[in-house]
Image: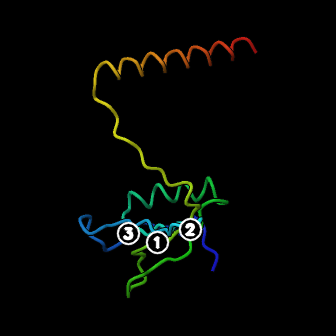
Amino acid sequence: MNYTADDMTGIVGVPTDEAETTVQFDRSGDIMNICTSDNTVVTKLRRLLKEHPEAYTLTRISTDKDGNHVFYTLTAPKKLLNFRAPLSSDPDRLAEAGRRLAAQNAARNSSVDND
């Protein structure tokens, strides 16, 4: 069955403290599976599915005995998964990052003004 982002409704009947998201992939594969029962993640994935249907595919909707959606499974290219280091709270590093960002914005605004 071909699902769309419109098929993703809110998760019903799963307590917040039991909501979970699992990302599964194997080392040699190019695809990851994203399984979630967390409404916050559902909202983010629904947006990604709408904006990037070429990358994200809704492959399964799991329901309870009453037909309520309780779990979604999507696939996406594994290369979209990203692990990041925590942001620094060091005031000197934050100030330097602010200066770099201000310089980038100034350069961008300057190039727009010259066009």
Amino acid at circle 3: Ser
Answer with the quarter of the image where residue 98 lies: top left
Please name which of the two marks, 1 or 2, marks the residue nearer to the observer.
Answer: 2
Instruction: Please tell me whether residue 21 is drawn above or below residue 69 in the rendered image.
Output: above
Closer to the camera in the image, 79 or 52: 79
* Residue 94 x %, y %: 35, 22
User: Which residue was labeled with disc 2?
Assistant: 28
User: Which residue was labeled with disc 3?
Assistant: 37
User: Which residue was labeled with disc 1?
Assistant: 72
* Residue 5 x %, y %: 57, 64
Q: In which quarter of the image is the N terminus?
A: bottom right
* Residue 62 x %, y %: 45, 80
Q: Do the residues labelled 3 and 1 touch (CB within 8 Å)?
A: yes
Answer with the quarter of the image where residue 12 lies: bottom left
**Residue at disc 3, secondary structure:** loop
User: Marks 1/2: CA distance?
Assistant: 24 Å
Please name which of the two marks, 3 or 2, marks the residue nearer to the observer.
Answer: 2
**Left or right of residue 111: residue 82:** left
Could you tell which of marks 3 and 1 lies nearer the N-terminus? 3
**Residue at point 58%, 59% (across, down):** 49
Instruction: Please tell me whether residue 110 is drawn above or below residue 90 in the rendered image.
Output: above
Amino acid at circle 1: Tyr
**Residue at disc 1, secondary structure:** strand
Could you tell which of marks 3 and 2 lies nearer the N-terminus? 2
Closer to the camera in the image, 20 or 15: 20
Amino acid at circle 2: Ser
Answer with the quarter of the image where residue 65 lies: bottom left
Q: Quadrant of the C terminus?
A: top right
Q: Are marks 3 and 2 in contact (CB under 8 Å)?
A: no
**Residue at point 55%, 19% (across, down):** 104
* Residue 111 x %, y %: 68, 15
